[in-house]
Amino acid sequence: MIKETDFLVIGSGIAGLSFALKVAEHGKVILISKTTLEESNTKYAQGGIAAVTYEPDNFEKHVEDTMGAGDGLCNRKIVEMVVQEAPAQIKQLIEWGVNFDQNEKGKYDLGREGGHSEYRVLHHKDNTGEEIQNSLVNRVKSHKNIELLENHFAVDIITQHHLGKLVKRSHKDTECYGAYVLNLKNDQVDTYLSKITLIATGGTGNLYDTTTNPKIATGDGVAMVYRAKGIIENMEFIQFHPTSLYNPGVKPSFLITEALRGFGAILKTFDGKEFMHKYDKRESLAPRDIVARAIDHEMKISGSDHVLLDATHLDSEKLKEHFPNIYKKCLSLNIDITKDPIPVIPAAHYMCGGIKVDKNGCSTINRLYAAGEVSSTGLHGANRLASNSLSEAVVYADRAAKHTISRTNHIKINKNIPEWDTKGATYTEEMIMITQNYKEVQQIMSNYVGIVRSNLRLERALRRLEIIYKETEELYQKSILSQKLCELRNLINVGYLIIKMAQDIHESRGLHYTIDYPKKHTVSEF
């Protein structure tokens, strides 16, 4: 089957949904979601969305906090742009029905998280992402120009390569004509042709054993664009959230928002001793890379499986009021956060690199845009400042929408694209190969390419991954496609990029910390 549209949106988080709403006034939109619209990384964002709202906060403070967290690798012009444009986009979210908490005076109840010098995080209790997701989904479902395709999986971006032409990463004239999409209900791969395609597929947390991401976060967008010869950058910077709930065997890991530390909770060792003062003067409110490494170090020297986050000294009623979902979740495990410290452990949380885009969300492939976690904008540098991701997503969705609207009338859909070739493919009888290789990839990345790395670990990870890559490609070439097989293939691609980019940096910087180069150095690449 071949379908045509003006705008093809792949991904249904805050970036994809807000982009779809804005361009739907100017053409037909097809929005692809590999599960239901309600399920996305956005949904699991507890803390909130960062933006300058009231004095004494100002743009310069937010810029400097972002630059500091990014460890010198942020693009200042991009940081200034996002910080200055975020308030207007948050106002748009409010107009679309998103409710942020207000205090008794009717002003927004701002939170503060690690790395922030002021209270600037707008939130809805401790489930801000879910509030945003539900509000946007309701609007998208009621829009006459948006066709929603749930349980559809984007397999590959269509370019000149599919017309038999050579495409290289160095080429400047590569164009995106749409995507091949797997219908998960009937296992058929259909052809979706579009004038403009937006990738908003989120992150890649499931590359690791422990992650706060939903199971759908498998690096699909990055892998697709990499295979299509688009430029990917900064993949070595994988952010581990310092505090996920220690609950072995349960996936995804339940996130204990950084806002709880902003509220006054304190990190302690397994035996109840404070430790963050040894690592940073900001203690429990240091940026995430510092806190995650500190926890990792304390766990290794003590041999414990987790550390503790203690909120028992705080006002119990206010604690339950501000963090009702955390209170409820912990209580279900017989942990009363007003009386008991919370066992926590770092978990893979956010991908700071991704598809390289310019200030309008344009990738290095013409007619292909990216927004949200899947993109690399220059905002985060070597480490994302807490709650900046949702701000980035709405700012770039808006910029991409404005940029594409002015172009669509001049773009014609390429009707010469061949349909997906399934000749000779059969259903695999070796699902055990997929599931086993999936587990092995997670173990390789967790053990060798985690919070702390070394040259030896990276070399070993690459060798192991190359074996799994060859096995998976052989299976892919002869099989009728399945979601699990495609996700495994994507995870292997992304794992390779993380390892190779980590090997290319001979220093510790932000989220990439290696014992071979423990001190930060200024090098030519930066």
Image: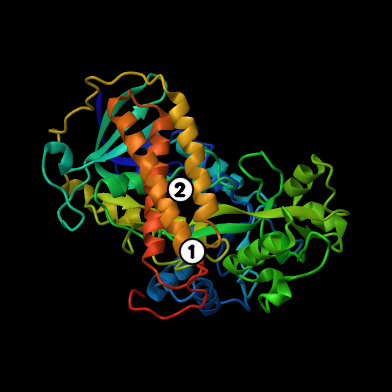
* Front position in the image: 442 or 346: 442
User: Which residue corresponds to mark 2?
Assistant: 202
Q: Quadrant of residue 338?
A: bottom right
User: The residue tagged with tag 1: helix, strand or loop?
Assistant: loop
Foreground residue, 397 or 201?
201
Where residue 73 appears, x then y in whole percent? Answer: 43, 73
SS at circle 2: loop
Q: Is residue 504 left or right of residue 305?
A: left
* Residue visible at 45% across and 42% down in the picture: 218
- Looking at the rendering, which quadrant does residue 385 occupy? bottom right
- Viewer-nearest residue: 89 or 159: 159
Residue 454's disc is 1
Tag 2: amino acid: Gly
Estimate the x, y position of residue 184 in percent, counting from the top left: 41, 25
Q: Is residue 250 visible?
A: yes
Which mark is on residue 413? none
N-terminal-most mark, 1 or 2: 2
Which kind of residue does numbered mark 1 sit on? Ser
Task: State the residue at coordinates (54%, 50%).
Answer: 446
For disc 2, the neighbor class at 10 Å (few under 14, some 14 to 19, many from 20) is: many
In the image, what residue occupies the spot 28% across and 52% down? 404
One can see residue 216 in this view: no
Mark 1 and mark 2: Cα distance apart in space: 27 Å
